[in-house]
Image (cartoon, helix red, strand yellow):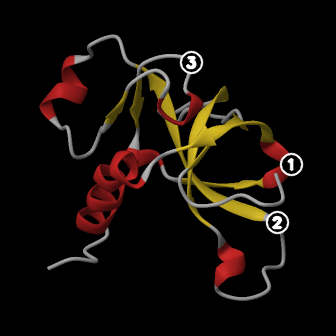
Amino acid sequence: MSQLEIGDVVTARFPEHDPQGHEQEGYRPAIVLGLPGRLGQPRFDLVLVVPLTTDHGQSWAAASPDLYPRLRAGMGGLPRDSILLLEQIRTLDTSRMSRYLGQLSKAHYEPIRRGLARMCRLER
């Protein structure tokens, strides 16, 4: 996991929360969004990721496709059709990454990039 790149698909362990909220927990696929080491020498080996959940045709995802981009099984090595949860961007220690699944193509990563840019007002 030391050579992660933006757009990599990994399995990660998202920590449990107490008290419980709406954040994703447990083992699940995630997409690497950011690498702090690109800006300088980070204090810790951390990676910015977005969790995924299985796509079962949820209406909330269909109602907000820019916030919840969909990826088909096989894209980046994903075992199932999945939904990205862009409102749940997290920083995780690389020790929480358990498995490398693959890399999204630029075309498959583009809706994620576009959604992040709009959400963070990086585009005008």
Residue under the point 72% across and 89% down: 40
Residue under the point 27% across and 60% down: 114
Question: Which residue is identified by label 2?
Answer: 45
Q: Is residue 24 above or below residue 94?
A: above
Q: Nearer the viewer, residue 69 or 3?
A: 3
Q: Can you see residue 10?
A: no
Quarter of the image where the C terminus is located: bottom left
Residue contact between numbered discs 2 and 3, judged by CB atoms under 8 Å? no
Quadrant of the rendered image containing residue 42: bottom right
First in sequence: mark 2 vs mark 1: 2
Q: Is residue 45 above or below residue 90?
A: below
In space, the residues marked 2 and 3 are separated at their CA atoms by 27 Å
Residue contact between numbered discs 2 and 1, judged by CB atoms under 8 Å? yes
Foreground label between 1 and 3:
3
In this image, 77 relative to 40: left or right?
Answer: left
Q: Amino acid at mark 3?
A: Pro
Circle 3 Cα neighbour tier, 10 Å, few/some/many (<14 / 14–19 / ≥20): few
Question: Which residue is identified by label 3?
Answer: 79
In this image, 99 relative to 123: left or right?
Answer: right
Q: Is residue 82 above or below residue 68?
A: above
Quadrant of the rendered image containing residue 45: bottom right
Circle 1 Cα neighbour tier, 10 Å, few/some/many (<14 / 14–19 / ≥20): few
Question: Which residue is identified by label 1?
Answer: 95
